[in-house]
Amino acid sequence: MSILRNISKTIGHINQKIAVVGITAGVAVAFINVVARYLFDASFTWASELSVTLFLWSVFFAAAYCFKKDAHIAVTIVLDAMPTRVAKVMLVLSHLITLVFLVAVSYFGYKYLLLVIDLDERSIDMWGMPMWIVYSVVPISFAFGAYRVAERIHGILSTSHDKIIKESEAEHVLAEMGMNSREYKDNENLQNLSKMVKDVEKKTGGML
């Protein structure tokens, strides 16, 4: 179990760092290029493609990280209306479908990567960089996402059906504010806020 725990931490660390560095560097490159174009009447030929690549890596790895937090948008109105036993089965099935999709994309992304390597495809603007480096984001990030979904499935299967709670992104935020702390039971404001979020989610079909 310690090995799996270390793998999980490593994947989370990689996802976070690439997402943060990618978005930060992408914004910096785009900003520098805009300043150079409008103030100095110059432009870096590599800036556009590099910024797109950085944003691409940031988004894909951030999406993989969201599987850990279960923060992807989900419509839970059907699950909320089902008995807990049925809801548990539905959750497992939906995650299994997601797992199959992620594994398939990762596999075929890897196959396409081998084709790119064989063709020796290179970027024209980014100093002749091999394009397999850019495209490797697909098999890696989807594999990380698949690992997270597999973790989620294991967690659902090992949890009693009457204790499974499908938390929304809003509920994660409320939890960070102290909803799950001891003070929650005595904090009327937090209770009212929690009730308000649940009411809004019922009206929006869980898409808050």
Image (tube, grey):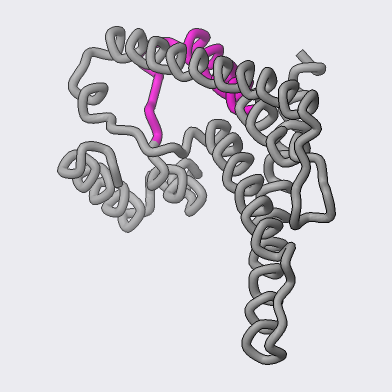
- Residue located 80% across and 32% down the image: 120
Task: Say above or below: 35 vs 109.
Answer: below
Total marks in image: 0
**Residue 191 x/y as whole percent:** 31, 49
Report whether 181 appears left or right of 204: right
Q: Please identify the quarter of the rendering in which residue 160 is found.
A: top left
Which of these two is toward me, 34 or 101?
A: 34
Asked if one can make out residue 6 in the rendered structure from this viewpoint, the answer is no
Q: Vertically, is 165 above or below 171?
A: above
Answer whether residue 206 is visible to the viewer in this image: yes
Q: Main secondary structure of the magenta part?
A: helix
Image coordinates of residue 207 in percent, x first then y, are 28, 42
Q: Is residue 137 left or right of residue 74?
A: right
* Nearer the observer, 59 or 189: 59
Q: Residue at x 83, y 49 (%)?
A: 128
Which residue is found at the position 75% from the left and 52% from the top? 124
The span shown in magenta is: 144-167
